[in-house]
Amino acid sequence: MAAAHVLVFPFPLQGHINCMLHFATALVGAGVHVTFLHTEHNLRRLGGRASASAPAGSSPRIRFLSIPDGLPDDHRRSVADLFELFKSLAAEAIGPFRALLAPSPTTGSPAADVSVDPTSGFPPVTCLVADGLLPWALDAAEELGVPAVAFRTVSACSFLAYLSVPKLFELGELPFPAGGAGLDEPVRGVPGMESLLRRRDLPSLCRRPNETDDVGPAQQALAKLSADSGKARALILNTAASLEQSALAHVAPRMGDLFAVGPLNAMSSPAPASSLWSEDDGCIAWLDGQADRSVVYVSFGSLAVITRDQFTEFLYGLVAAGYPFLWVLRPDMVEAGQDAALREAVGGAGGSSKAHVVAWAPQRDVLRHRAVGCFLTHAGWNSTLEAAVEGVPTVCWPFSADQQINSRFVGAVWKTGLDMKDVCDRAVVEKTVREAMESAEIRRSAQALAQQVRRDVAAGGSSATEFDRLVKFIKKLST
Ligand code: UDX
């Protein structure tokens, strides 16, 4: 049997890189060789941190390569121009990607190792695990004789909602009326969630800001992208049966095979370093000086951009709630923001000992710190899972994409936090933060969920068992 060597290729954004690197690390732990593929732009941003993330003692089995994403280096690659990144990758990265996998003229076998790094000693690539947002990579690998498996970094519930878009149109539940009217109307077209979802809980792309906006084609395209994961040998999701059993049961029949192997952040140890921003460890020393469960941690992930008014509402709400808070303010996070002025505003309003601002935090260390009492989050799937693993109650203010449905699950299914969706008002921030900090019921649910998901990834748990099945599946594809 050929030694299994998996090429792991995430969509080049922080939330995608993080969980696929956890996945890669877990594969290495299972004895599989991994080449982790970044874009050149991101590998430059990661600098030495990329190779430093190889697990201690086992680094010979993981390595990091890169291909160009086709965009100029000074391109923002921000949420406003994601479509450009999609298009550019498909047009420009495909050539170098194929070259990486192309059969070697001398051996006739796929030869990422030979063509790029003759000294690596890695066996030829035997399997691709690529982000489902890179369908061209999945197709190219199969064309070149390398079996391809899709990986989606979102929740199963949001993936199912995307799959259900054609049915929602059929039932007349899409398109919505434009604007914010009727967002509390129930939605029945997502199987298993008939009595749970309202229009406001569907992925943000389902909304139409104006009467003239026709988002139908984009909605159908996203549905097709999700359905196309069914053409791959299998789909991997970073979730657990205990979190999303019903959604998984509805997704499974539409995929070649389905593996629910999460939360991956609880599975791979030690944690790989993968931050595109440089982490400010000073916040851990600041947390060390705070009382147990007294701090509100505030972060809206790697992409969300808020207006200056929203910034002000959060700031006043947090100050009024009265707890010390640690706020991640990425330099590009507040529209028309001047970083220094915003930092000063937080320091001034919070009082120097009450507020601490960083541009980027070591989030998993923050969430496991004894001083953190709750997490005000945009409900990105990684952040949601990281809070779940540490048993930290959340206040969710979903920004876009899958976050609307994730926050519905937090508030109404797992009951591990509160869903502030579509409201950004200082009084609501104050009230929900207080409730999340003080509610014994929410804390109990969060801790029970943490125990459950830790059992899921421990030996014999559902995700660990699925991961073992996946490793066998990959090894079989490698024969
Ligand atoms: C987005 C989507 O929201 C998410 O659902 C999808 O799966 C991936 O793309 P993002 O908006 O960045 O990602 O949020 P999230 O999924 O929460 O990922 C952010 C990651 O950055 C988390 O792993 C978090 O730990 C990390 N992070 C964030 C830090 O390490 N430091 C910070 O200061 C902030």
Image (tube, rainbow, N blue to C red):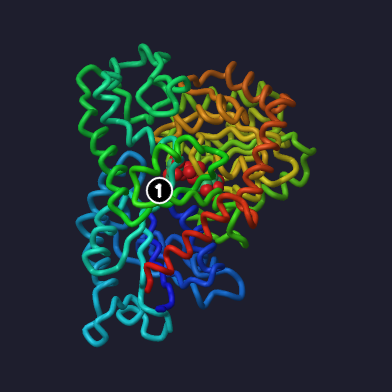
* 210 shown above or below 396: above
Residue at (40% x, 48% y) in the render:
152
| In the displayed structure image, the side of residue 320 where residue 180 appears, left or right | left
Residue 239 x %, y %: 51, 45
Residue at (28% x, 15% y) in the render:
177
Ligand 1 near label 1 (Cβ, under 8 Å)? yes
* 204 shown above or below 35: above
Residue 366 x %, y %: 65, 46
* Quadrant housing the N terminus: bottom left
Can the viewer see residue 332? Answer: no
Residue 198 x %, y %: 42, 19
Q: Quadrant of residue 286?
A: top right
Identify residue for label 1.
152
Residue 140 x %, y %: 23, 62
Q: Quadrant of residue 145?
A: bottom left
Can the viewer see residue 99? Answer: yes
Residue at (51% x, 37% y) in the render:
244
Disc 1 packing (10 Å; few <14; some 14–19; many ≥20): many
| Nearer to me, 347 or 243 | 243
Residue at disc 1, secondary structure: strand
| In the displayed structure image, the side of residue 64 where residue 93 appears, left or right | left
| Nearer to me, 77 or 55 | 55
Residue at (56% x, 68% y) in the render:
29
Q: Quadrant of residue 41?
A: bottom left
Q: Label 1 sits on what residue type?
A: Arg
* Quadrant housing the C terminus: bottom left
* 121 shown above or below 456: below
